[in-house]
Amino acid sequence: MNDNFIFAPKNSSDYPLYTTACVGNNGNPNILTYAKGFSSAANHLIEICISSMGGEFPADIAVYPICFNMRHAIELYLKGFVSFVYELANIKKIQKKITIDILQAHDINKIWNFLTTNYSILDKRLTNIANSISPYIECFGNIDATGQTFRYPYDTQNNKHLTKQGIINIMHLGKHFKDLEEKLSFFHYFHEILINEYQLGSFTKNLSRYDLSKIAKKLPNINEWKNNSFKMIKDNLKEEYSISSNELSKAIEIIKKHYEFGYSIGIVPPLIDFDEDEFYFFIDKWYQLNDLEYINIELDESKIYSSNSLFKQTKRLTRSAKIGEFLDDLIKTVKLETITNVHTLYYFSEECTYSEQYRLSYSFHKNSCQQNKEQSIKHILQKPMLLIEVIINLLQLNQNNTALVLMKKYNLQKYIKDQIEKRNMYISIILE
């Protein structure tokens, strides 16, 4: 810590902990942290100004720090968006139409022009959201493009600021700024979602993952692709999305290999190194250890999962004794790949957001299971919700035949349907 006596006391205990801010590498603030700080300051100053009713903090003096904080918050948000544009352009291997020096740029009109120009070539969803924000940026850009209007009463040519504006209503301004703040915060979040989405690799030059999902639903079942009508469907898609035959072909190849999109055309890729017989054998051993009582089909959940539950303690003791009996049989019979798939399918919804992440998750769990096969088997056998999670994640990956076999064998159709509804999940298959 440096010895700057103004910013930090020698003894931090002299002041309440909540009055100490973590800065620099201590807390690792980013540009969004700064943006939220300035926007929050503006909102609080508005509240103080309004509550003072023209007294100690009247609008005539409050307007300058309020508007300066607002405008600077906007600049910081936009500069954060610029970083996203560079990252997304790099992922897509698309050259930016115009460039900007993020450190030197302060004119929010120029920054916004850079963003909107590049949004149009990166992803039309960005353009759609940007259109709802543009009127707000235009208002601030017209009155204070470079951040000087509310800092000083005169510009560098000694011209007085705000002579054409005349009045600014603090309450009216605050209402619209809160709308803008919500839009900017959501847009920041949406940029992050898009970066994660594009990192999956499911896109072409002009088509996003979202576009591919829509195209998949418009394609007929692969058995109908020999019909003459398929050519007409492809021509319509090329026209609708303004893409070439070559790009549509690339899109279709992605769809055919995709766990989600392939379902729409009647093709679902198999799980990696999946041995059905071994998989069912493993699940059956798990069932013998846990049975369906343990996953709360008919018994009260609070009794089962309470740490003091006699039921739970008894089941654990019984299960531990049985694991020893099953372990040698499982080690000899079940290959590493099957154990890996069981682990991957159990943790899939917890670890992954998109179906593309199954392959990465499989590699991670294979490496982990390889290090200690016996311990991996023991670990997963003791998961009381294993069967439920595995079935739900099989359905998410459209491995419906395998999921249906397990549901019918263990009479879980109704329970799985209830779980899907409870979790607000969309599953393609209809469960009776």
Image (spheres, rainbow, N blue to C red):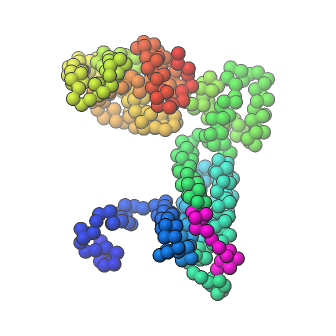
Residue at the limit of the structure toward the bottom, as seen here: 158
Q: From the viewer's perspective, is 46 left or right of 243?
A: left
Viewer-proximal residue, 347 or 180? 180
Q: Position of residue 157 (x, y in %)?
A: 66, 86
Viewer-proximal residue, 17 or 358? 17
> Would residue 271 be seen by someone viewing this image from the given angle?
no
Is residue 123 on the magenta stretch?
A: no
* Residue sitting at x 76%, y 39%: 240
Q: From the viewer's perspective, is 234 left or right of 92?
A: right
Q: From the viewer's perspective, is 353 left or right of 214?
A: left
Q: Position of residue 73 (x, y in %)?
A: 54, 65
- Where 296 sits versus 58, above or below? above
* Residue sitting at x 47%, y 34%: 358
Locate the N terminus by quadrant: bottom left
Say which quarter of the image contains residue 408: top left
Viewer-proximal residue, 216 or 151? 151
Which segment did they paint magenta? 161-174
